[in-house]
Amino acid sequence: MAGFAALIQALAALVAALAWPVAFVVTAFAFRLEVRQVLAKFPTFIDRIKAIKIAGIETQLDKVVEKLNANPVEGGVVSSVEIEAAAKIVAETKSLEDSDISVQMDKLCIEYGVTRKVMKAGFERTQIMNGILGRMRSLAPSLSQKLEFYKGSSDPGYRLAAVAMMQMEPEKGDLQWLIDRFRVEHAFIFYHAALVMKSMFASALPDKKRAILSAAADSLAILKKFDGIPDKNSIVVLESILNSVE
């Protein structure tokens, strides 16, 4: 009797296991037209969700600029506003593809290039470029896996994005690449390259500190040979690194 009961239980379990797949197939067949219509709309639904997430990222970036304009950060260092925005964007972009986020960075790279070309040097242009950099920093952790791509670009806006990534994650700083900024870039970029070195130095182990000191000295030598008036702010940052060991 016990064996018969066990057999009944086993059969019941088998029927239960088969019931859902069978019911699903029967239902799907009965409502095949409706199912096709739903599946046809599914990509549109995904696109809408993606658009909402991208709009949320753009809102975060706009808030960064508003807060930076209201409370400028002394010395151009990474602000808590940018760090907070970056964390939110990383969380919001987990379901997005790299290309979706890259488009946002592309816009900033182009905006930087246009701003530098069409506006005269001065406080207003620098403030706008600081806002662009602030948004780049906020996006940087979501795209840091593409750092090599940005470093290797022939466009200064993309190279500024690489600097922004290193500012947010100093451990990814490339000393030789940073030294080269002082040979090929202009004041805004090599000032922020100097800030990367300073951040790297602050958290480096003794062996690494020596390499950073050497890089800072090389960069300062290049900067002082600049054809024109060297950027004073960059000199101050580089000298602060060298003077920190005295």
Image (cartoon, rainbow, N blue to C red):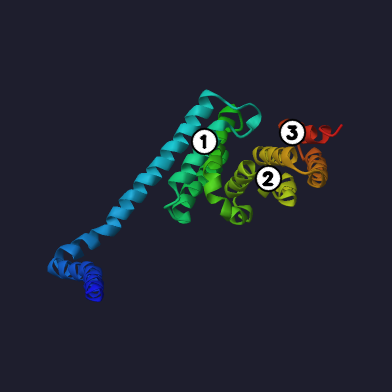
- 199 or 122, which is in the foreground? 199
Q: Is residue 234 left or right of residue 71?
A: right
- 171 or 225, which is in the foreground? 171
Task: For residue 119, say whether it is visible.
Answer: no
Residue in the picture at 51% in, 23% down: 70
Q: Viewer-nearest of labels 2 and 1?
A: 1
- Give the x, y percent position of residue 222: 80, 43
- Give the x, y percent position of residue 86: 52, 40
Instruction: Give the residue at mark 3.
Output: 237
Distance from disc 2 to disc 1, alpha carbons, whole Å, reads 29 Å
- Give the x, y percent position of residue 143: 54, 50
Distance from disc 1 to disc 3, alpha carbons, whole Å, reads 25 Å
Q: In this view, does 9 lie to the left or right of 100?
A: left
Task: Say which quarter of the image contains residue 226.
Answer: top right
- 97 or 88, which is in the foreground? 88
Distance from disc 3 to disc 2, alpha carbons, whole Å, reads 17 Å
Mark 2 element type: loop
Query: Mark 2 or mark 1, which has the lower sequence index?
Result: 1
Q: Is residue 104 left or right of residue 173?
A: left
